[in-house]
Image (spheres, rainbow, N blue to C red):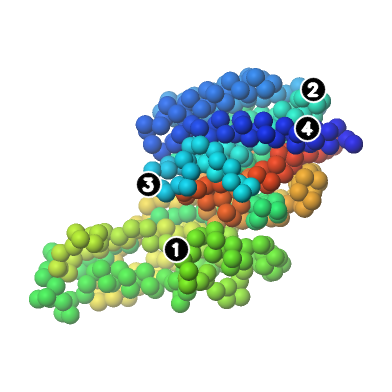
Amino acid sequence: MTTADDVAARAKARFSTTLERLADYLRYPAISCEPEHARDVRALAERIADDLGGLGMERARLLELDGALPCVAAERRRCPGAPTVLVYGHLDLQPVAGEAWDSPPHEASAREGRLYARGAADDMGGWVSHLAAIEAWLEVAGELPLNIRLLIEGEEEIGSPNLVRYMDAFPDAFEADVMVLTDCENPSTDVPGLTVSLRGLMDVEVHCASMAADVHSGLWGNAIPDPAVALMQLVARLVDEDGRLKHGRVEVPEAWAKASFDVPLGPEVVREGARLLDGVEPLPGRGRSTAEWIWRQPAVTVLSTTLPAPGREKNAVRREASARLSVRVAPGQRGEDLYRVLEDVLLADPPGGVKVSMRLLSAGGSWLYTPKGPAFEAADRAYEKAWGKKLVQIGVGGSIPFVAMFGERFGDLPLILNGVMDPRTAAHGPNESMDLALFERAVLANVHLYAELAALPR
Ligand SMILES: [Zn+2]
């Protein structure tokens, strides 16, 4: 048995202690988007900083900036010559208001092999899996095999608005040779995922106008172009028969496209993960895998319109109508290029000559990463030991702002994106949960990852 095997055995033996720690943290309603919970975010940050000191991390402290919720930072760097790994996670949560939970969202509840609570997998379980590995190493070996920094953010769920400022203000808290960013997903509970791509995100407004004022729909209907209908016609131009964005599609490497059919993301996973109603079918693949559609192709969603809510309408043709569209940009695709494509489609030949205008409200970059080099080989070995399987390269259909920020600043370093979510996690929704067997494997993988990274030639 190697030391790492002993440490892994200890981590397994103390798994229930790890779960208790996790359950404690999950009691804090640390919801960063609700100002009334700012003090809960802070209280949790203080609690974590205290605990980190207690479990052997050094310089455990809150990082603070004006107008920002705090980050927790800590380090243990007692292995001169060994690499330093930075572990990033976040302590803040998505809101729960108005959601129907089967158990209280801020009380961890274990049922059928899963732990239910807001934040269980996104992202408390993610970084607590590292605390568990660190504790096991210190208990068994008295020291870590390498140097570790922890950085736990308090504003990830509001888009990390101050993370770059934190990077500027506290550069030493981010200094590392390898970064493990742990807020991502696994393709299933028994296949570990390494995230290598994210889609970008644009918010676009489309506005249609045809008259100086609203007019009576009985007197003028059928005689004038209705801007609300024109808006729907324009949105319909964007999509194919399945309702998917049909413009701006990208070529993905053939080998990747083929391999993506092996990702366990079949219709049943879609049906359950997205909670489709009986009789509603997942969209047909039409030659592409679900993974490709979600991870690698652009997509459009109608977020809102200026049409009145039912019950607030009047019998009139409205003078104008607009919609906000959320557009996911393919990894590697430039948002401005896709925006221009959409402009060409939406502004050309307006229905009935209505005045159409567009605005780009916000744009966040996509991310496409090629993992190579010894750190990823070390990660493969570590995951194979803990999961019996190598990391499978996956994408995320969403856009995680902090990843782009880390990529921009530290793109030359190995960035290992993983996490403890799986397709049933329901992050951001009611009954968020984490698979407990997966969580245990994540802890064991971290134990081995530290040893494998420490053994790399410098
Ligand atoms: Zn998260």
Check the image and report above or below for 260 versus 77.
below
In front: mark 1 or mark 2? 2
Q: Is mark 1 within 8 Å of ligand 1?
A: no
Q: Earlier in the sequence, mark 1 or mark 2?
A: 2
In front: mark 1 or mark 4? 4
Q: Position of residue 221 (x, y in %)?
A: 16, 76
Q: Is mark 3 within 8 Å of ligand 1?
A: no
Circles 4, 3 touching at the beta carbon (< 8 Å)? no
Residue indicated by mark 3: 98
Q: Position of residue 57 (x, y in %)?
A: 67, 22
Q: Quadrant of residue 272?
A: bottom right
Tell me, yes or no, if residue 157 can be seen here: no
Q: What is the crowding at mark 1: few (fewer than 14 residues within 10 Å), some, or many (at least 20)? A: many
Circles 2, 3 touching at the beta carbon (< 8 Å)? no
What residue is at 45 percent from the left and 51 percent from the top?
363
Give the position of the C terminus as an image quadrant.
top right
Tell me the amino acid under the disc marked 3.
Gly
Residue indicated by mark 2: 142
Marks 4/3: CA–CA distance: 41 Å
Marks 1/3: CA–CA distance: 26 Å
Residue indicated by mark 1: 300
Residue indicated by mark 4: 10
Q: What is the crowding at mark 2: few (fewer than 14 residues within 10 Å), some, or many (at least 20)? A: few
Q: Position of residue 33 (x, y in %)?
A: 41, 38
Q: Tell me the SS state at disc 1.
A: strand
Q: Tell me the SS state at disc 4.
A: helix
Tell me the amino acid under the disc marked 4.
Arg
Q: Earlier in the sequence, mark 1 or mark 4?
A: 4
In front: mark 2 or mark 3? 3
Left or right: where 304 falls relative to 200: left
Tell me the amino acid under the disc marked 2.
Gly
